[in-house]
């Protein structure tokens, strides 16, 4: 996953630097993860963020997803939609 779109992106200017740093660290650490591993990794990252007192508003989540979606292939977008549906069911 190419994360260059996260760094210095004006669309993310209103997101707290700590949150943005967390996202960039997560993305950097997941570059070799298989798609099958992404959901458990995302759940672990969500838990880690909560433990660190980092929370993302619904608007921030939507903004980040809207930035990521165009960088994904059609099949990756479908997987993202499935993953988001699962997270929503689990209350994340």
Image (cartoon, rainbow, N blue to C red):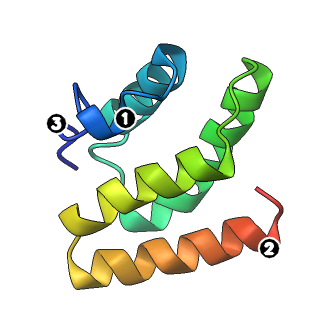
How far apart are labels 1 and 2 at the CA level?
27 Å
Quarter holding the C terminus?
bottom right
Residue 89 disc label: 2
Left or right: residue 66 compared with residue 7: right
| Closer to the camera in the image, 30 or 17 | 17
Left or right: residue 9 compared with residue 61: left
Provide the residue designation for mark 1. 12
Q: Residue placed at 82% from the left, 65% from the top?
A: 90
Q: Residue placed at 52% from the left, 15% from the top?
A: 18
SS at circle 3: loop
Give how far across and how far down residue 66 sits, in percent. Answer: 38, 61
10 Å crowding of disc 3: few (<14), some (14-19), many (20+) = few
| Closer to the camera in the image, 46 or 12 | 12
Left or right: residue 58 compared with residue 42: right
Q: Is residue 41 visible?
A: no
10 Å crowding of disc 2: few (<14), some (14-19), many (20+) = few
Asked if labels 3 and 1 touch by Cβ distance under 8 angstroms, the answer is: no
How far apart are labels 1 and 3 at the CA level?
12 Å
């Amino acid at each position: 996953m190419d994360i260059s779109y996260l760094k210095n992106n004006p669309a993310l200017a209103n997101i707290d630097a700590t949150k943005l740093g967390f996202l960039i660290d997560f993305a950097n650490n997941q570059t070799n993860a298989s798609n099958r591993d992404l959901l458990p990794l995302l759940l672990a990252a969500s838990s880690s963020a909560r433990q660190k007192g980092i929370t993302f508003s619904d608007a921030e989540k939507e903004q980040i997803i809207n930035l990521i979606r165009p960088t994904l292939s059609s099949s990756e977008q479908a997987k993202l939609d499935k993953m988001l549906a699962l997270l929503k069911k689990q209350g994340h």
